[in-house]
Image: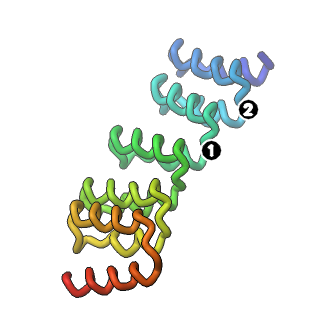
């Protein structure tokens, strides 16, 4: 280890477990910048481990800053980590995490991104006037590969019914 790496580990505010996470970051060839990002006494060793593993996986510091926001529950943080690792963007996640949606509605919006639906299709059914079950039905219909004419007709029909 270099002197700067040793100095990072030498902070007396770190527990032995936290020091181990810092050392593991260097052992896994994470840059000094990445290791120093999570080498912060405000993170317990479990959080450090989570951040280290996500950095090793390839998530950016910006992505990690987003999901580490203390406003989010642990369950939500885990979901965001999963989504980021599976190709959703922060913009996708911000779109579905709107507090006006309930958990079921959020799941249907999220599923639309995984289904590779066009954003205009997702925006159509991501509306609080639709229940999660209605969003599910609309999403499946849009996912079925209908052409634009059928889609326009369907949109008009749904608008008339609501």
Residue at position x 52%, y 25% in the image? 49
Q: Are marks 1 and 2 in contact (CB under 8 Å)?
A: no
Residue 32 is left or right of residue 122, and the answer is right
Is 8 placed above or below 69 here? above
Q: Nearer the viewer, residue 20 or 80?
A: 80
Q: Of helix, strand and loop, which one carries label 1?
A: loop
Residue 101 placed where, x, y %?
28, 63
- Gap in angstroms between the C-alphas marked 1 and 2: 12 Å
On the rendered image, what quadrant is the C terminus found in? bottom left
Q: Which residue is mark 2?
A: 31
Q: Nearer the viewer, mark 1 or mark 2?
A: 1
Marked residue nearer the N-terminal end (1 or 2)? 2
Query: Dot 1: few (<14), some (14–19), or many (≥20) neighbours within 10 Å?
Result: some
Q: Quadrant of the N terminus?
A: top right
Give whichever of 26, 129 is nearer the camera.
129
**Label total for image:** 2
Please state the horizontal and vertical placement of residue 151, each as a whole percent of the image. Answer: 40, 79
- Tell me the residue that label 1 is attached to: 60
Task: List the single residue furthest toward the right.
Answer: 2
- Please name the residue shown 72% across and 18% down the image: 6
Q: Is residue 53 above or below residue 130?
A: above
Position of residue 23 in the picture relative to residue 75 (left or right): right
The image position of residue 11, as x and y in percent, is 61, 21
Q: Quadrant of residue 104?
A: bottom left
Q: Residue furthest top?
A: 16
Q: Position of residue 31 (x, y in %)?
A: 73, 32
Residue 13 badge: none
């Amino acid at each position: 280890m270099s002197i700067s790496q040793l100095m990072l580990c030498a902070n007396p505010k770190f527990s032995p477990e936290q020091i181990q996470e810092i050392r593991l970051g260097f052992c896994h060839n994470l840059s000094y910048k990445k290791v120093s990002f999570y080498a912060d006494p405000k993170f317990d060793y479990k959080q450090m481990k989570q951040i280290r593993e996500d950095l090793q996986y390839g998530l950016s510091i910006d992505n990690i800053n987003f999901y580490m926001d203390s406003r989010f529950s642990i369950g939500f943080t885990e979901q965001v980590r999963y989504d980021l690792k599976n190709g959703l963007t922060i913009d996708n996640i911000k779109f579905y995490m709107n507090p006006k949606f309930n958990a079921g509605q959020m799941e249907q919006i999220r599923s639309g991104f995984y289904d590779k639906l066009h954003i205009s299709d997702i925006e159509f059914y991501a509306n609080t006037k639709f229940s999660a079950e209605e969003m599910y039905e609309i999403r499946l219909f849009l996912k079925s590969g209908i052409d634009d004419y059928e889609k326009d007709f369907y949109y008009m029909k749904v608008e008339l019914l609501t």
